[in-house]
Image (cartoon, rainbow, N blue to C red):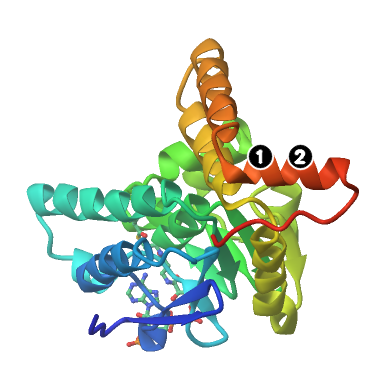
Amino acid sequence: MQMNNLLCEYEEGVAVVTVNRPKALNALNRETLEELLGCFAELATIRELVGVIITGAGDKAFVAGADIAAMQGLDALAGRAFGLLGQRVMRTIETFAKPVIAAVNGFALGGGCELAMACDIRIAAVNARFGQPEVNLGVIPGFGGTQRLPRLIGVGPALELLLTGDMIDADEAYRLGLVNRVVTPEQLLPHCREILANVAKKGPISIKLCKEAVRAGMELDIDSACRQEADLFGLCFASADQKEGMQAFLEKRAAMFGDH
Ligand code: CAA
């Protein structure tokens, strides 16, 4: 797929998707959002894909938000359509069958923070900065930020960030539970790859069903979510992963799972 704003490299089960508009601090315009949709559709066809890492080009920004220059002249209908497009991208990532890790290498603001929040795991470099500064621009977050931020860090801390538009550093993001870990810029991609190398050793069916159980379950009441967990747990017993995983344990050897 020919892409103007994204780099997508695939090697040994890991895809690295880099938002590549460094002159605009990797801001998300319509074309970039559409390319993200296309890219994830293609990645979904790679059977042996273990997971995806999303990062930003350059050493300054992950993604500094939706593209303000592109949004400036929108009317209400076009603004809504742009929001819906961004939301579709975030939902595609969130529901993607394989784990997606955000390698946050700098500013993750507005749509950039929303992109990181749609990923399953967030690893931040020490120079990462997070925020939802939309109120500075006379708008509100439009790619799911008003919903994912309170779900991730709680209503009080989320509202403080959303209502002040303040930026926080990586350590504060870690303290709030917005990121899983903070590492040096040099360690960022290797660390994300290490996580996926660890995932690669596990049963591919259980990885997929585990993400599904968490992601779909978060949207249900506890009884329905637990019923769904029981269904997915039951489904594991129809898989080669369960046969091999349990047999390997009982034979005191490492499990040899199939391709992801
Ligand atoms: N959209 C478009 N262009 C952007 C951008 C954005 N979100 N963020 C930065 N840029 C551009 C700047 O306009 C500038 O371009 P020029 O060199 O052509 O002037 C270039 O990137 C470098 O930016 P700065 O000169 O501003 O760099 P800085 O180091 O002084 O500041 C910054 C960095 C604090 C991140 C600052 O650029 C900034 O505040 N950016 C905007 C952040 C923002 O408000 N994001 C939210 C957008 S709204 C949104 O995302 C809505 C939603 O939920 C969908």
Answer above or below: position of 243 versus 128.
above
In the figure, is residue 85 to the left or right of 22?
A: left
Q: Residue at image x 32%, y 56%? A: 89
Q: Contact (CB < 8 A) between labels 1 and 2?
A: yes
Q: Quadrant of the C terminus?
A: bottom right
Which residue type carries mark 1? Gln
Q: Secondary structure at mark 2?
A: helix
Q: Is mark 1 within 8 Å of ligand 1?
A: no
Q: In which quadrant is the N terminus drawn? A: bottom left
**Left or right of 145 in this view: 35:** left
Residue holding disc 1:
242
Name the residue at 41% across, 86% down: 22
Mark 1 residue element: helix
In percent of the image, x 49 and y 66: which residue is there? 49
Residue 19, position as x, y percentages in the image: 40, 77
- Residue 215 seen by the camera: yes
Q: Residues within 10 Å of mark 1 (few under 14, many from 20)?
A: some
Residue 130 vs residue 235, the one in the foreground: 235
Residue in front for this viewpoint, 10 or 65: 10
| Residue annotated with mark 2 | 246
Picture coordinates of residue 161 (x, y %)? Answer: 55, 47
Tell me if residue 112 comes above or below residue 140 in the rendering: below
The answer to whether residue 38 is left or right of residue 61 is left
Quadrant of the image where one finds ligand 1: bottom left
Q: Residues within 10 Å of mark 2 (few under 14, many from 20)?
A: few
